[in-house]
Image: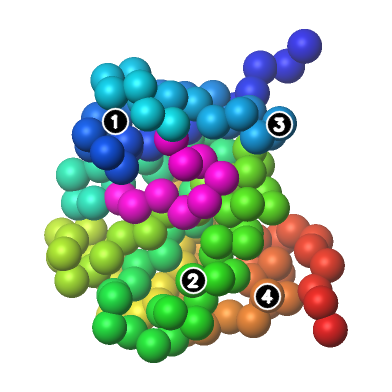
Amino acid sequence: MTASPQATIPCPFCLTVNKVGLDPSGVRPACGECGRPLPVDRPIKVTDQDMEATIRGSDVPVVVDFYADWCQPCRMMAPMLDQLASDLHGELLVAKLDTDSNPTMAVKYGIRGIPTLIVFKDGQEWKRHTGVLPPDRLAELLEIEVEVEE
């Protein structure tokens, strides 16, 4: 039996960083500190303090959405990223970084426009795209096949 891939994610409740298994069956891991379920089947919020641990501590690709709450194109991307996180649970991790609240990572990764998606593999930047992507182009960026509703 193959072990499920691992990911390092912050707890949205107590902010403890957890190393967890990404069980594709849908069972959510619990935070080791507060015991609450960790939402690995939806985008997770990361900050300047925990983004590096998340991208380096994950066995699966991590898609980081650099966004801002006021950004209309970012809002357009949100439902697609929610669906992506749900559909590919256990195969990739979707993270969101609010660039207004977390300028250090935005500067470090040279974010000049939002939304910007950066895909990390093995802790390293693999691909990048700035601007809104339709679902088929998002799948192309990630080199995956998805069914697009007409």
Point out residue 82 in the picture as x, y percentages from the top left corner: 55, 61
Upstream in sequence: badge 3 or badge 1? 1
Upstream in sequence: badge 3 or badge 2? 3
Identify the element where label 4 is drawn: helix
Q: Which quadrant of the rendered structure holds the N terminus?
A: top right
Labels 3 and 2 touching (C-beta < 8 A): no
Identify the element where label 3 is drawn: loop
Point out residue 73 in the picture as x, y percentages from the top left corner: 43, 86
Instruction: Specify the principal SS of the magenta part.
Output: loop
Point out residue 96 in the picture as x, y percentages from the top left corner: 38, 59
Upstream in sequence: badge 4 or badge 3? 3
| Image point (43%, 35%), residue name | 38
Q: Is residue 63 magenta?
A: no
Q: Residue furthest top?
A: 1
Vertical placement of residue 133 versus 83, above or below: below
The label on residue 100 is none
Q: CA distance from mark 2 to mark 1?
A: 24 Å
Q: Which residue is mark 2?
A: 78
Label 1, residues with CA under 10 Å away: few <14, some 14-19, many ≥20: some
Q: CA distance from mark 3 to mark 2?
A: 24 Å
Q: Which residue is mark 4?
A: 135
Amino acid type at circle 3 is: Ser
What residue span does the magenta drawing correspond to? 38-46
The label on residue 17 is 1
Amino acid type at circle 4 is: Pro
Amino acid type at circle 1 is: Val
Amino acid type at circle 2 is: Ala
Q: CA distance from mark 4 to mark 3?
A: 24 Å
> In the image, which is nearer the foreground, mark 2 or mark 4?
2
